[in-house]
Amino acid sequence: MRGWTAAALFGEDANENGVLDPNEDDGDQSSPTDDADGELDKGLYPFLTVYSRDREINPDGQMRLDLNSATEQQLQQIEGVSQTAARSIVAWRNQNRFQSLADLLNVTEAQQGQDNQPQGSSSLRTSAMRSSSLRQSTMRESSSRMSLRSSPGQSSQGTTSGQSGNTVLTVSDLAQMSDWVCAGTEDKRNRINVNTAPLEVLVALPGMTEDLANAIITHRSSSIGPFMRRSDLLSVSGMTDEVFRQIIDYVTVQSYQFRIVAEGHCDQTKAKVEVVVDIASSPPKILYMREL
């Protein structure tokens, strides 16, 4: 890719072994060029991936309810979701379309007795399967880190016919629902695992500060960690409703893709390989492999 160099990608770690070797700490005396400061600059390589996807699975191991096809009755089965909220969600999506979870904060109260059931909706799973191939959003189309700078849920939707204009859901409601619903059941890309991401990756999230990113790391490493659900982020010291709204569509608490570096020795011979494995499939798939 134009503009990229080995130094930008790998830093001083020319052999990608994660260890500061003598030739990587001697300035200009030998390749690669380094600053001889006694610390290994690993470049951007540890923070980038092209193999990232998160599944829409709820804490019970079942498919999350799709906000674009779930019925009022199904939504009311979620703890904390009232009849008014469920009715309003269905009414809102008949005039709009949920592109993100943060769109829930745009939902306005539907009038009593309004017919909110979408035509042709026989079941959540059937409806989701029929529409999954058509469902796209800005977040899912983007495959670059820069997409993290967008902030879903901020667009002005206006008051739809049959709705009062008063929003019915709070950030606390959004947090409680976030592990049980989704905006489209297809796998999502660009999500960051808040249980494993380093500081350098966490600060790339919209609205994130270095202090808050450090608070997330402290929280997940404490006796009350790790994060079991995305809603747990609201309990992090310094987390605000506004930041939670901005990051909810870009975070997850589990990973399905893993990078494995394996080294084997036999007498004077050794071999080292790097492998990326996807465990979202059954059986797991090897997505990438190379010898180091």
Image (cartoon, grey):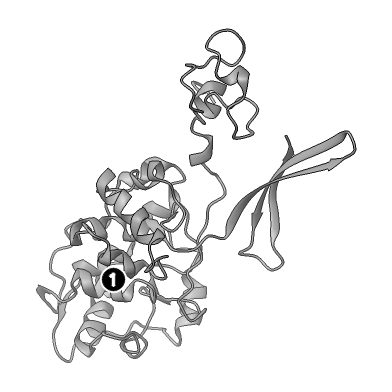
Q: Is residue 5 visible?
A: no
Report the quarter where the N terminus lies.
top right
Corner quadrant of residue 112? bottom left
Corner quadrant of residue 59? bottom left
Query: Above or below — where is 24 with respect to 85?
Result: above
Query: Above or below — where is 142 with respect to 183?
Result: above
Give the residue drawn at x 49%, y 21%: 3
Depth check: give the residue in front, 207 or 65.
Answer: 207
Q: Position of residue 6 (x, y in %)?
A: 57, 23
- For the residue labelled by badge 1, is the local secondary structure a helix, a strand or a loop? helix
Tag 1 residue: 175
Depth check: give the residue in front, 165 or 21.
Answer: 21
Give the side of residue 126 with respect to residue 103, left or right: right
Report the quarter where the C terminus lies.
top right
Give the residue drawn at x 26%, y 67%: 235
Give the side of residue 285 with respect to residue 190, left or right: right
Q: Position of residue 167 (x, y in %)?
A: 13, 72
Q: Position of residue 132 (x, y in %)?
A: 49, 68
Q: What amino acid is found at the position of numbered circle 1 in the picture?
A: Ala
Crowdedness near tag 1: few (<14), some (14–19) or many (≥20) residues, C-alpha within 10 Å = many
Q: Is residue 200 visible?
A: yes
Give the residue drawn at x 19%, y 59%: 240
Depth check: give the residue in front, 133 or 172.
Answer: 172
Query: Above or below — where is 184 with respect to 247?
Result: below
Q: Position of residue 228 (x, y in %)?
A: 42, 70
Give the residue drawn at x 47%, y 45%: 143
